[in-house]
Amino acid sequence: MNETNNTDNMFEISVIETVPRVSKIITISCCLAMSILYVSSLYIWNNKHNRDHPATVKRRFLSVSVVMLVAPVFLYSFSSTELMERVQFNELLGLRWHGLLMAILIPYLLTMLLFLGPLCVEFQSESQKLFFDFEFWKSSFKNILWIRNHVMAPLSEEFVFRACMMPLILQSFSPLASVFITPLFFGIAHVHHIIERLTMGMDFTAALIISLSQLAYTTLFGFYSAYLFARTGHFIAPFLVHAFCNHMGLPDLQELWQQQLWKRILFICCYIGGFIGWVLLLNMATLPSIYNNKIFWPRQCELFTNNTLLCTA
């Protein structure tokens, strides 16, 4: 009988669920406005150069930096007053100290497991030696395209599309629904690349296929990134994972198929094993308790007869 009562008194709760909900129309509108603002900032310059030209890259650095200053205003202005009273604004953005080390290490290692196959293919080549070469890193940080792909793009995109959007969406939708909603803005925001491809003279059909493919994998990555933010409550987790994924890119299956038969079988096993391991460890490795995340993701709670509330991850 006691076991039944204990079960009946169990429920899940997070800080963000204990405050009044914000209108879904407001949060969706805010996220749409931030998406439009981010993409528009890339095209405000009267520039005849392509996207990889240093002049274009530097101007876009400035544009997205301004957007990063404006986006938090949406979160601050339209969040629940009660939530703002209970949670510090920097913590709402995922900028906090508690659980920081775990948020740096665990999601990164988890993502490396997902890319176990491609990593094994890389490690059997000489290219991996570059990462232990000081000159490689020195030259990389002088390369503006490397900085764009590995620093500025992950930093600005994760800050706007995760740190500013997710806390808003979570005030209107459940955590799981939020994980599937915000990546849609992130994926659609990448469709603008079709304009650049057409400007460069690419055939419309080819540009459309490439852009739709990019929409698919950026949206899929967005699901993962949003999940990491909601579960860890840290901005650093999706930022580092984003930078790593930009470095890895899509798996090079052609290079895999060019390997000797025994190597090909071994690497295919690494691909499959890495994916299975990632799936099995995803929930365990992102337990909110590991990161002291009490804000976004529901924790298991038990209400006792004396109205005492005990919560665990």
Image (cartoon, grey):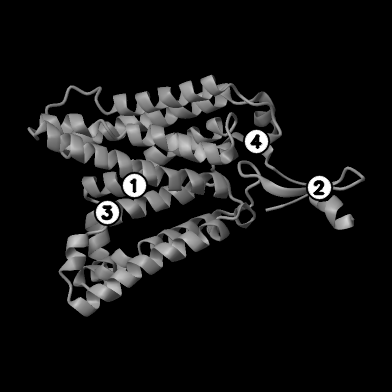
> Which residue is under mark 3?
250
Instruction: State the CA–CA distance, disc 1 to disc 2.
Output: 48 Å
Q: Within 10 Å of the Cα at label 3, are there few (<14), some (14-19), or many (20+) other Cα atoms?
A: few
Q: Earlier in the sequence, mark 2 or mark 3?
A: 2
Q: What residue is drawn where x is 48% and y is 57%? A: 107
The residues bearing labels 2 and 3 have C-alpha atoms spaced at a distance of 47 Å
In the drawing, does residue 226 fall left or right of residue 131?
A: right
Q: Quadrant of residue 296?
A: top right
Return the residue at label 4. Answer: 16
Name the amino acid, label 1. Answer: Val
**With respect to residue 190, does 255 lie above or below?**
below
Picture quarter containing residue 101?
Answer: bottom right
Q: Could you tell me if residue 67 is visible in this image?
A: yes
- Tag 2, which secondary structure? helix
* Amino acid type at mark 3: Leu
Where is residue 194 drawn, in percent x and y?
Answer: 20, 32
Crowding at mark 4 (Cα within 10 Å: few <14, some 14-19, many 20+): many
In 3D space, how far apart are the residues under numbered discs 3 and 4 (Cα atoms)?
Answer: 35 Å
Q: What element carries label 1?
A: helix
* Residue located beneath label 1 in the image: 151
Q: Residue at x 59, y 50 (%)?
A: 97
